[in-house]
Amino acid sequence: MLNLLGGLNGRQEPDWAPMSRRSFLKIGGMAAGGLSLSSLLSLEARAKTGSSNKSVINIFLPGGPSHLDSFDLKPNAPIEVRGEFKPINTNVPGIQICELFPKMAKMMDKFAIIRSIFDSEGHHDGYQCMTGRTHKEMKPAGGWPTFGAFVSKLQGQCGLGVPPNLSLMYPSSTRTWGDPYGAGYVGPAHAPMTLVDRDPLQKPQGMTLKGISLERLRDRTSLLKSMDTFRRDSDQSGAMDGVDRYGQQAMDILTTSKLVEALDLSKEDPKVLERYGSNDVTYQRDGAPRMVRNFLVARRLVEAGARVVSMNYSRWDWHGGDGMNFPSSRVEFPMLDQALTALVTDLHERGLDKDVTVVMWGEFGRTPKINNMNSRDHWPAATFAVLAGGGLKTGQVIGATDKIGGHVTERPVMFQEVFATLYHRLGIDVRTATVDDPQGRPQYLVDSGVEPLRELL
């Protein structure tokens, strides 16, 4: 499998030993259901290729972040409900958010908050945030594809060297918090290419490509120069004419600098890099590390041509014996505030705010009543999503919950409606777009009657 892994605060591991051209070419055997990279590309060629370069960054907060302590505070509720944090005004009159998100408050006009997602299944995993589906509903043969897999199937690759569906989801001890989920019935050609991993010591490894460090990949004299020479000689001799065209595409992915350059944060303006803060590579128990600079990596990946980048960030399940809901929030919220606002600022400064949509959410919300360990338990009846970019109508709140944040009272929103909105921003009409399942039956991307959120368009 192709694994490209981010090192500590963007630093990379030392160079590896030299390797032969033959060994390099064998990198093309990316395992995914027993298929080589060229085979995967061959399957992917059956997709309809669009010309759009619009993209989505899907940020999953594993564990169920508290809506009541972040973006739907209830300052007038009883003390056992309202918690320890105060709401603050934002630059949009009438919208208040938690005091621990001061950077976001200053640019609320660039965000939209949905406070009324009501249909969480209540499972402790990212399945709904990756597919819009629930585990209990009937699945087609092969299973439901993720959002990124559908996009890969329908729109294909944007350009050479960067696959359309990429994952920055760190594997976690709670497996379902780090699972990007697969391509379902559309097949492994459209599964997310995973760019991160963890070693037995539970620390992110250095960036490697089948044992080749990033430094090795950047070394034009010892690797890319020899490959360029090989390709030029082969082209002149006509040898490449007999190579399957998907093998050539595989070679393009493996030899182009686009993916490597996008992952290499040393290429970034130091001032921009600093804006995101510093990574904390420590795994948050059974969750993901606080890799704030992966928000920047995601921006660089979509800028390089990825259509969908999914990522998980930290761990948000704070209701057990540790009683860590409020102490943890004091650590997590400011780091998230910095990383998310840096990403959205970047998109606007680089003219990407109309083309790149950002969505951030978790699997469910938290109980209105604080438990006897000064924390909040699981609460699927109400949760939130934060969106930005994509040419959406921002600077607004959609929906509302009751006076204690327990149930939705205005504009109930389903996960699938958010996905319908994301598809729409990519140029995919959910009313007409279908993908055939293994039995040849056309399957819609969302359920009948589900429409994009009109408030955002």
Image (tube, rainbow, N blue to C red):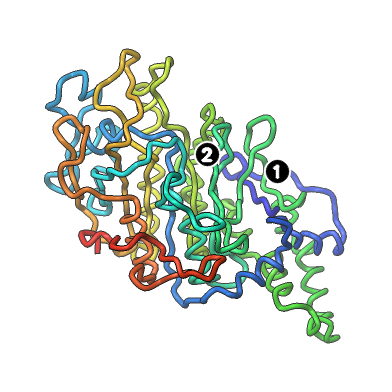
Q: Secondary structure at mark 1?
A: loop
Q: Residues within 10 Å of mark 2 (few under 14, many from 20)?
A: some
Quarter where residue 183 is shown: bottom right
- The residue that disc 1 covers is 13
Vertical comparison of 303 with 207: above or below: below
* Residue at 51%, 29% in the rendered image: 284
> Which residue corresponds to mark 2?
176
For the residue pair 188 and 400, the one nearer the viewer reads as 188
The earlier-in-sequence mark between 1 and 2 is 1
Q: Amino acid at mark 2?
A: Thr
Amino acid at pointer 1: Glu
Relative side of 257 to 24, left or right = left
Which residue lies at the image location 16% right of the left edge and 44% below the top edge?
95
> What's the distance in space between the residues labelled 1 and 2, CA to CA?
29 Å
Percent coordinates x, y for residue 308 in the rendering: 48, 59
Give percent across and percent down for residue 353: 35, 62
